[in-house]
Image (cartoon, rainbow, N blue to C red):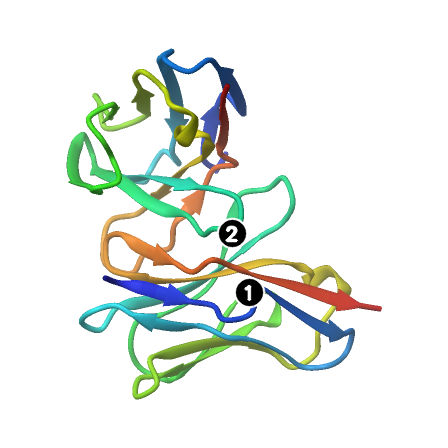
Amino acid sequence: AQSVAQPEDQVNVAEGNPLTVKCTYSVSGNPYLFWYVQYPNRGLQFLLKYITGDNLVKGSYGFEAEFNKSQTSFHLKKPSALVSDSALYFCAAGFQKLVFGTGTRLLVSP
Amino acid sequence: DTGVSQDPRHKITKRGQNVTFRCDPISEHNRLYWYRQTLGQGPEFLTYFQNEAQLEKSRLLSDRFSAERPKGSFSTLEIQRTEQGDSAMYLCASSKPGGGEKLFFGSGTQLSVL
């Protein structure tokens, strides 16, 4: 079965510190990889994607993600977290249809 | 760009009743997706359309579920004889054609089956 794993239910980080939200995937082929963010009472919003090429992709709001083919991982990163980054983050992989992880809640404290 | 809109935002129904949800995608997007999300889980793929053609359905979609996109614009998702296990957030998304295109999600329809 195809799956996406986000091993941490919650990540806590202090404002100004770097953050990492982990994601590994088990999807056949070379799937497209995505990160989406969900704020309370709002729909999922696209952050960034990896199709091919450079393993480090940059996205919205200063976020970036690092693709590692050998580890089938696509970790989300940000050099300096903001309180406003606190939200629910979803990793997804696939082609026409996406398989989503269960989400990681990011809590950035002042 | 008015975004993806879904109606209604909330639906409460009794077990055994039929419900229908509507999704209006971004106008220039010819792909439309339905996902279902339950508490503590990520969205699960249900089905998707390219224009009016339904190209794929998940095995999660039982015979009680049917989706249409008659003119390649808005879409409806109908659930017949609802069950308590159908309680979830039903999400619609749209995208441009092509591989790796990002999805634009609506705010969802929250279904509660009593």
Q: Nearer the viewer, mark 2 or mark 1?
A: 2
As shown in the figure, which amino acid type bears the numbered disc 2? Gln
Say which label, 2 or 1, has the lower sequence index. 2
Is label 2 in a helix, a strand or a loop? strand
Please give the chain letter of the residue carrying mark 1: A
**Position of residue B23 measured from the top left corner of the image (x, y, whole percent):** 39, 27
Residue sitting at x 35%, y 85%: A71
Q: Between A30 and A2, which is closer to the camera in this rendering?
A: A2
- The residue located at (47%, 51%) in the rendering is B41
Q: How crowded is the residue under tag 2: few (<14 C-alpha within 10 Å), some, or many (20+)?
A: some
List x then y, in percent, for residue A68.
Answer: 37, 85
Q: Quadrant of residue A17?
A: bottom right
Horizontal side of residue A42 vs A4, given as left or right: right
The quarter of the picture where the C terminus of chain A appears is bottom right
Instruction: Look at 77% across and 78% down and name the residue there.
Output: A16
Judged left or right of residue A72, residue A19 is: right
Looking at the rendered structure, which numbered label has been put on residue A45? 2
Vertical position of residue A55 compared to residue B81: above or below: below
Extreme residue in the bottom direction: A70
Marks 2 and 1 close (CB-CB < 8 Å) = yes
In the picture of the structure, the residue carrying the numbered disc 1 is A60
Amino acid at pointer 1: Ser
Q: Position of residue A104 (x, y in %)?
A: 56, 63
Q: Is residue B35 above or below residue B71?
A: below
For residue B106, side relative to residue B98 (left or right)? right
Q: Residue at x 50, y 19 (%)?
A: B114
Distance between the Cα atoms at labels 2 and 1? 10 Å
Looking at the image, residue B13 lies above or below residue A71: above
